[in-house]
Image (tube, rainbow, N blue to C red):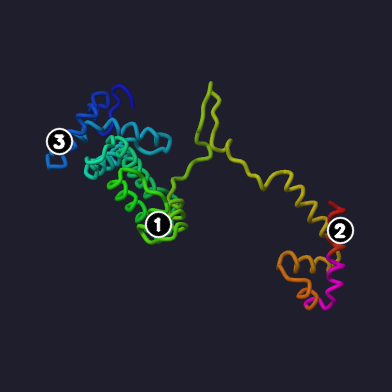
Amino acid sequence: MQNKVEICGVNTSKLKVLKNDETQALLLRAKQGDMKAREELIAGNLRLVLSVIQRFANRGENADDLFQVGCIGLIKAIDNFNTDLDVRFSTYGVPMIVGEIRRYLRDNSTMRVSRAMRDTAYKVLQAKEAYMAEHQREPTVDEIARMLELKREDVVFALDAIVDPVSLYEPVYSDSGDTICVMDQVRDSKNTDENWLEQIALREAIAKLSDREKRILSLRFFQGKTQMEVSTEVGISQAQVSRLEKNALRQIKKDL
């Protein structure tokens, strides 16, 4: 998106860039209803939209579509910006643009989220935008939960449910032609070769036990029953259950 690249018919090399004092002056005029100032603000911050959509360049989405959606976020940022606070417009505008693009990507994603969860997520996002418009900063999860009278967990689950999926082959770092992808950073600490071998050995050790010992271990450690409950179910004394359990565990440890 450099030089004379055109997006939505706009020559990006000729986009105007506003200085901070110019932006503040136009924002004040726009708040007073000056539509010309509002249009100048939009035109003068299109490069801000371009810089944001470059973050989503590897998603396979059409750049024109992302640019248009980003412009919607820019307009919302202009209309909701609080000029009374000492905050640069870009500090507030970038999250608004990013949020609008992410909302678009979520709505057009092949992964489907339940309607109830999606509705909750949208309420959370709306509350987040309203809070940012008033305070010029992002609210915490606890603050959003209090605003919507929801459990903290519900807010977290709703936001997690609409997070954009990431390809395992998406590059995260590249140096001298050697690219590291997300897949290279993912590690399964449970299903390792060592664990597989231990599970195989454990199954073989349990297979050597008698049927009664297997049943006692199943009742004790998989169903969580006490030795007294096991003794009643199996039909032997608690002392016998204790002895058989210890012998079975000793034999398993020996085989492992």
Q: Residue at x 36, y 45 (%)?
A: 138
Circle 3 residue: 37
Of badges 2 and 1, the one in the foreground is 1
Secondary element at tag 2: helix
Q: How far apart are marks 3 and 1 (CA)?
A: 37 Å
Q: Is residue 225 above or below residue 90?
A: below
> Is mark 3 in CB contact (under 8 Å) with mark 1?
no
Give residue 82's position: percent from left, percent from top. 24, 43
Q: Mark 1 points at which residue?
A: 145
- The amino acid marked with disc number 1 is Ala
Residue found at x 35% / y 54%: 122
Mark 3 Cα shell of 10 Å, populated few (<14), some (14-19), many (≥20): some
Vertical comparison of 47 with 71: above or below: above
Badge 1 density bin: few <14, some 14–19, many ≥20, Cα 10 Å? some
Closest to the observer: 51 or 59? 51
Q: Name the residue under label 2.
A: 250
Which tag, 2 or 3, sits closer to the chain's start? 3
Numbered range of the magenta stretch: 233-245
